[in-house]
Image (spheres, helix red, strand yellow):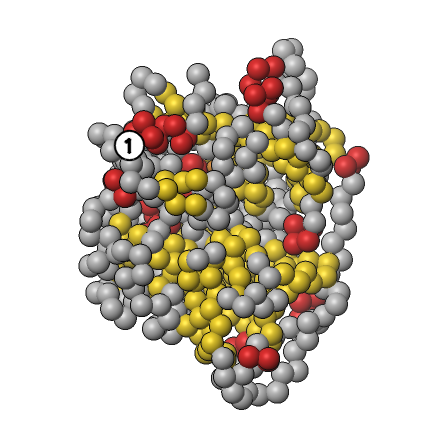
């Protein structure tokens, strides 16, 4: 039997005390029932009292042989995951978080396309986790060590053995050396923990950071740079009055997992609702939604227009003017904001009514010689006829009445079932996501970049009854900022979302999954494999 998440949550009593409308428009749980009264109340923290911190730039610690060409030395970074205590707000005691090289978010990597590097990710975390593990989730049982980690470079064209496969986790005292060839266009990538069954907790604890790749096309554009280019890693957290992170738990005994977490405070680069002093000129903001589950609709309070010049996988063909930017978890946006008309003013950036940060525009600054180019980079749209295969893949949610647990799956298939998606290297496929649930799921495929074709609403009941696609709305082709190269796509509720994917780079085993981290940890993730050649037709094919 199929039952919706809302119904499940109501039965479980998770949201007895009120609903919060999320930016996706779906009614979601404000999980007060399951939370202690020590959580900060709305408006309890004064916004915009702390300056925006900038994560340090990662520094290589030496060189090592290039795994692809032993006669060449390439930069080697050692980045350690450690527990630390940081002030996230002026009026709160220091918060326990996990970071990379004593920074959360971790250091920003400054790299160049075509210039490979090695990163040793070292796990120097404590032996006990400080957030509520659900031991009933696949891969998170009592038979494995509590603290484990593996780092994935989201959006990276990375060989499989360096991609951070969820089961390749390692424990405190161990490390893994990953090779990042960087053979891809300039963009902002996202590195974060990916450990099976506890990824949501590790990222919530702070294990995430930004990884920038630059190239000659970007260099030639004369975009705002140096101190006029600012990374913004945005994520929400539940903060308690004592400054500590609260991760909500379900009321079901022994099964603390909850379907989503929406925090009470937005942090940017590790500070709650910070401010940034800017000059009256153009800035380039590299925005990453590092939240477990929250979607943002970022806008300035006076609806000031800004320009998006890039998305997940790099520059758009030309800038897109917007007053409101929607960002799903793990999506990135490269944004140019012109503050020149705002000298002496303060501008708030918010997501609906939720304050994110404030810009304080000074009255004077150095002359602005940067430009907002009309053309950025050629992005050739892939023709549908280039696809050799089309896969119809469902996004599903089910309640198991016996034990009240909730399954979220891709194509109704759990993680550990044999691999079903096996594209052939250097071929192109269309993946069609049929979202049979009541929520938007941001779907991410490792290794590849893809283009969004279109979306169309469907009658989900018709699909449940007969697996037939009955459309109830018009086809909405990708437009605006969704016409660039992507690695994460919003699959909206009751909608068929179609993407076209050239499988390039490496053969081997990767994963694709929902990037709501609570879903990903609870079976909404599948391995896939890129094959070298078309497999022999199976007898039962
Ligand atoms: Cu951002 Cu599989 O990850
Ligand atoms: Cu999901």
Residue 42 point in image, percent of width and height: 31, 57
Which residue is labeled 1 in the image?
13
Q: Residue at x 43, y 62 (%)?
A: 356
Residue 277 point in image, percent of width and height: 46, 78
The answer to which of 158 and 430 lies nearer the viewer is: 430
Residue 499, by quadrant, is: top right
Q: 385 above or below 65?
A: above
Where disc 1 sits, the SS reads loop
Is residue 182 shown to the viewer in this render?
A: no
Q: 398 above or below 220?
A: above
Residue 104 point in image, percent of width and height: 36, 61
The answer to which of 276 and 540 lies nearer the viewer is: 276
Q: Is residue 518 left or right of residue 510?
A: left
Q: 415 above or below 184?
A: above
Label 1 CA crowd tier, 10 Å (few <14, some 14–19, many 20+): some
Quarter of the picture holding the C terminus = top right
Residue 529 point in image, percent of width and height: 57, 32
Work out which residue is located at the far top of the displayed protein and give it: 539
Residue 518, by quadrant, is: top left
Q: Residue at x 44, y 53 (%)?
A: 290
Q: Residue at x 50, y 84 (%)?
A: 344
Quarter of the picture holding the N terminus = top left
Residue 102, by quadrant, is: bottom left
The answer to which of 477 and 28 lies nearer the viewer is: 28
The answer to which of 401 and 474 lies nearer the viewer is: 474
């Amino acid at each position: 039997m199929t039952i919706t998440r809302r119904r499940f949550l109501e039965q479980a009593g998770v949201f007895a005390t009120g609903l919060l409308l999320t930016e996706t428009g779906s009614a979601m749980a404000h999980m007060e029932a399951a939370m202690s009264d020590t959580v900060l109340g709305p408006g309890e923290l004064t916004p915009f009292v702390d300056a925006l911190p900038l994560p340090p730039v990662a520094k290589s610690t030496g060189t090592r042989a290039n795994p692809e060409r032993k006669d060449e030395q390439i930069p080697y970074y050692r980045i350690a995951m450690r527990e630390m205590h940081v002030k996230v707000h002026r009026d709160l005691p220091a918060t326990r978080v996990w970071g990379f090289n004593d920074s959360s978010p971790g250091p920003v990597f400054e790299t160049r396309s075509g210039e490979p590097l090695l990163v040793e990710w070292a796990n120097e975390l404590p032996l006990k986790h400080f957030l509520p593990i659900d031991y009933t989730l696949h891969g998170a049982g009592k038979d494995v060590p509590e603290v484990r980690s593996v780092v994935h470079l989201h959006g990276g064209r990375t060989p499989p053995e360096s991609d951070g496969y969820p089961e390749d986790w390692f424990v405190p005292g161990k490390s893994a050396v990953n090779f990042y060839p960087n053979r891809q266009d300039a963009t902002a990538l996202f590195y974060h923990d990916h450990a099976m069954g506890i990824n949501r907790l590790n990222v919530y604890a702070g294990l995430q950071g930004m990884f920038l790749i630059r190239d000659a096309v970007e260099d030639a554009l004369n975009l705002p740079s140096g101190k006029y280019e600012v990374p913004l890693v945005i994520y929400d957290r539940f903060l308690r009055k004592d400054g500590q992170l609260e991760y909500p738990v379900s009321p079901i005994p022994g099964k603390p997992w909850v379907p989503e977490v929406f925090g009470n405070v937005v942090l940017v680069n590790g500070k709650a609702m910070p401010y940034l002093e800017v000059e009256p000129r153009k800035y380039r903001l590299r925005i990453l939604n590092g939240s477990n589950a929250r979607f943002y609709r970022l806008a300035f309070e006076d609806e000031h227009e800004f320009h998006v010049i890039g998305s997940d996988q790099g520059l758009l063909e030309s800038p897109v003017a917007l007053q409101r930017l929607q960002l799903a978890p793990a999506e990135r946006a490269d944004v140019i904001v012109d503050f020149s008309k705002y000298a002496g003013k303060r501008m708030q950036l918010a997501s609906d009514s939720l304050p994110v940060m404030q810009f304080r525009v000074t009255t004077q600054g150095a002359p602005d010689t940067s430009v907002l180019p009309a053309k950025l980079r050629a992005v050739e749209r892939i023709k549908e006829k280039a696809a050799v295969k089309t896969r119809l893949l469902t996004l599903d949610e089910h309640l198991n009445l016996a034990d009240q647990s909730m399954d979220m799956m891709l194509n109704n298939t759990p993680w550990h079932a044999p691999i079903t998606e096996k594209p052939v290297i250097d071929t192109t496929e269309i993946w069609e996501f049929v979202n049979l649930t009541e929520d938007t799921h941001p779907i991410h495929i490792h290794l590849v970049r893809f283009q969004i074709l279109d979306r169309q609403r469907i009658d989900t009941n018709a699909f449940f009854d007969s697996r037939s696609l009955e459309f109830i709305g018009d086809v909405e082709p990708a437009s605006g900022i969704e016409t660039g190269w992507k690695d994460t796509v919003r699959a909206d509720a009751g909608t068929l979302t179609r993407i076209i994917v050239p499988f390039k780079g490496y053969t081997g085993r990767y994963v694709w999954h929902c990037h709501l981290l609570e879903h990903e940890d609870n079976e909404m993730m599948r391995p896939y494999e890129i094959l070298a050649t078309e497999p022999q037709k199976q007898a039962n094919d």
